[in-house]
Amino acid sequence: MKVTETELAGAFLIEPDIHADDRGFFVETYNNALMSPMTGPMEWVQDNHSRSNPKGTVRGLHFQAPPHAQAKLVRCGRGRVFDVAVDIRKGSPTFGKWTGAELSAENGRQLLIPEGFLHGFVTREPESELLYKCSDYYDPACDGAVRFDDQGRKYDAKGNLTDWWTEHDAKEFERRSQCFVDQYAGYTATGDLKLNGKLTLGENVADNGGVVLALMALRSRLQGKPAEKIDGFTPEQRFFINFAQCWRGKIRDEAQKMYLATDPHSPDIFRINGTVSNLPEFIEAFGCKPDAQGVRPVSIRVNIW
């Protein structure tokens, strides 16, 4: 078993030994004697099991505050996820920074997330299952979450339904977000049915903002390192290719019609094309010409944050 501390103190990547043969495999997923010299002693009191059916499901970012703060030991029992931990410990030298790892049933990796961290993940295969140990019991009074779409503004720091933005910020947000409404309402999903730009606004804001933040994180990690090409693609190009692959999928017209009326998410293809069409970083990465298909004119590109 290999135990490696990440760049965030107290967060560890654990890689157990997998013994496989033609019958299957055996793996020791937890060994206190092997792990505690690196991680310190841990006491686990609760086991959780989470299943997400659609590929691309996002859960988090969640945390549990004192007096029932939780550390978690997370692994993937089926499928594949990208698991993320964010340091929100007050006074921490890495406050606001994150670490992440791909966990799968095949690689057996685990992420040990200490108290004082946000936790979340996105599934990269359908029917993915996460299993994790917790150092304290779940307490709904201590449960919290962070979100970066247009809904977080409606709740104050104590979770009360209070819009805490200034009048100026709110008006400017409404002006910019209306551009998203107009953009996505112009897309045709199937037949002559178009997207509902208002219904999908929150998730479209999150998609566009999340990709920009993720790209910033990539560039921060690459700072000072050579931009190595792999299979002929730069790091930025691979980033956008992976973003597109994350939302690959097929859906029948009948199901698509139902989702257009009820689902706050845009159809997969527009979560990709609608997002990157607004990003000068995408255009620069692939050297797109101004009149290339899918490139929105500068005058109508949307940028909220």
Image: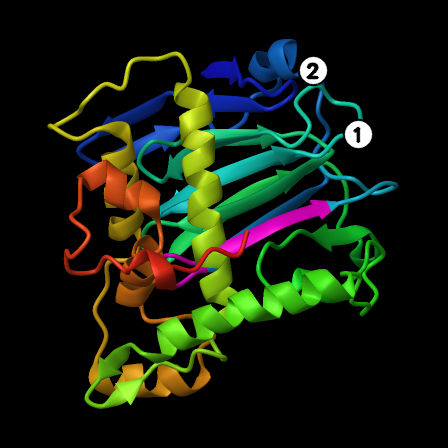
| Alpha-carbon span between mark 1 and mark 2 | 21 Å
Residue type at mark 2: give it: Gly
Are circles 1 and 2 on residues that touch, CB within 8 Å? no
- Pinpoint residue 245: horizontal percent, then vertical percent: 24, 50
Q: Residues within 10 Å of mark 2 (few under 14, many from 20)?
A: few
Tell me the residue that label 1 is attached to.
Answer: 90
Q: Relative to residue 129, is residue 174 depicted above or below?
A: below
Q: Is residue 273 left or right of residue 158?
A: left
Task: Find numbered disc 2 in the image and state the secondary structure of the residue it sits on.
Answer: loop
Res 187 → quadrant: bottom left
Residue type at mark 1: give it: Lys
- Pinpoint residue 215: horizontal percent, then vertical percent: 41, 37
Looking at marks 1 and 2 on the same chain, the residue that comes earlier in the sequence is marked by 2
Task: Find numbered disc 1 in the image and state the secondary structure of the residue it sits on.
Answer: loop
Q: Nearer the viewer, residue 30 or 253?
A: 253
Magenta stretch?
Answer: 52-63
Q: Is residue 181 left or right of residue 239?
A: right
Q: Is residue 118 left or right of residue 211?
A: right
Answer whether residue 16 is visible to the viewer in this image: no
Residue 55 covered by magenta stretch:
yes
Tell me the residue that label 2 is attached to.
Answer: 40
Q: Residue at x 31, y 24 (%)?
A: 19
